[in-house]
Amino acid sequence: MGIMERSSNGGPGYTSPARQSPGLILFMVDRSLPRTGSTNRLQAALDVVYTQIRAIKDRFQSNNKQETFRFVVMEFANAPQRFNNYCIDDFVENVDVIQYTKEFNQGSIRGTSIKKALDEANNCIKHHLKAYVNHSRNRKPPISIIMFSGNPHETSSDRNWNPQFHGVSTPTEYSNHSVDYYTKLILNRDHVFFGVFDFSDNEIKGERVENASRITESLMKSALSAEERYGVLKGDRIRDVWPNPMDLVGKPFIFPATEFNSQQLSKFLAVMLKLGTFTSTSSDNDDGTGFSDFWG
């Protein structure tokens, strides 16, 4: 059995990344503007988030992983704004940014379209399997999706609002389903690992992502063993942010990143992102292939 154990949130069945079956790493980043008169902790943490994304990108690029991995960044927001493409180069791809446009006077926007973002992530998976994977052997490459969520779902984004008539709207396709519905579309694929770092303010009411891939015993043991095998320095290991890492086994990969200050957040994200993308950087026979390139 590979490093993923079968569960309702993911399991075995993926093949090692290769040119005919490249892996996919997708980062989903909420770039939402802060609410008027409040501090948006996601904004303060964005530099840390993108620093870690760039570090992972540079590691993959320097080890010539372009033909065995696709690296995609998807930015989404709650209102029109200027997006800074931190990671654009020949290796990184960007999907179209997702924006919830405020075309009517309904007061401050207090969330973002989590449903639309998750739906787009599922579209990215389907596009990857159709356009990049050779299906002659029913290959299912490992896919890691890490979401940085800054807001709850904005229910107003489930409707199309008439800009000419205040308060007049029609429901969209998203109005019939919950956030959990779109999360399960991702989690029902046994070769996908989905994790979330939640920066949202708990005082803001609304639907949030509450399900993610569970951290399995084999995943944690493999990651800890690889740290020892490849001599990861103390201070950069899983135990340095989680003294008892086996306590995480069985729990969904959802972490409230707002609990960490900027310095702690950088170390926390560096370590946990490696764990969250471990299935995309290791071969299915668990020999650590690719992991040395990523952690070394």
Image (cartoon, rainbow, N blue to C red):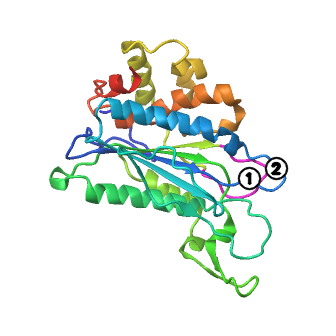
Residue 283 percent location from the top left of the image: 28, 32
Q: Residue furthest right?
A: 37
**The label number, if any, that marks residue 38 in the structure image:** 2
Along the viewing direction, whichever of 103 and 121 lies nearer the viewer: 103
Report the amino acid beneath label 2.
Ser
The N terminus is located in which quarter?
top left
Residue at image x 53%, y 23%? 246
- Image quadrant of residue 247? top right
- Image quadrant of residue 47? top right
Number of residues whose C-alpha sits closer than 10 Å to that of mark 2, classed few (under 14), some (14–19) or many (20 or more): few
Q: Residue furthest bottom?
A: 165
Residue 272 percent location from the top left of the image: 53, 31
Q: Is residue 291 visible?
A: yes
Magenta residue check for 207: yes
> Is 100 on the left or on the right of 25, as rendered?
right
Q: Are marks 2 and 1 in contact (CB under 8 Å)?
A: yes
Residue at image x 66%, y 25%? 263
**The label number, if any, that marks residue 34 in the structure image:** 1
Q: Is 261 placed above or below 25 here?
A: above
> Is 42 on the left or on the right of 70, as rendered?
right
Residue bounds of the magenta highlight = 199-209
- Image quadrant of residue 23? top left
Residue 174 percent location from the top left of the image: 56, 70
> What secondary structure predominates along the stretch shown in magenta?
loop
Q: Is 81 placed above or below 15 here?
A: below
**The label number, if any, that marks residue 64 in the structure image:** none
Number of residues whose C-alpha sits closer than 10 Å to that of mark 1, classed few (under 14), some (14–19) or many (20 or more): some
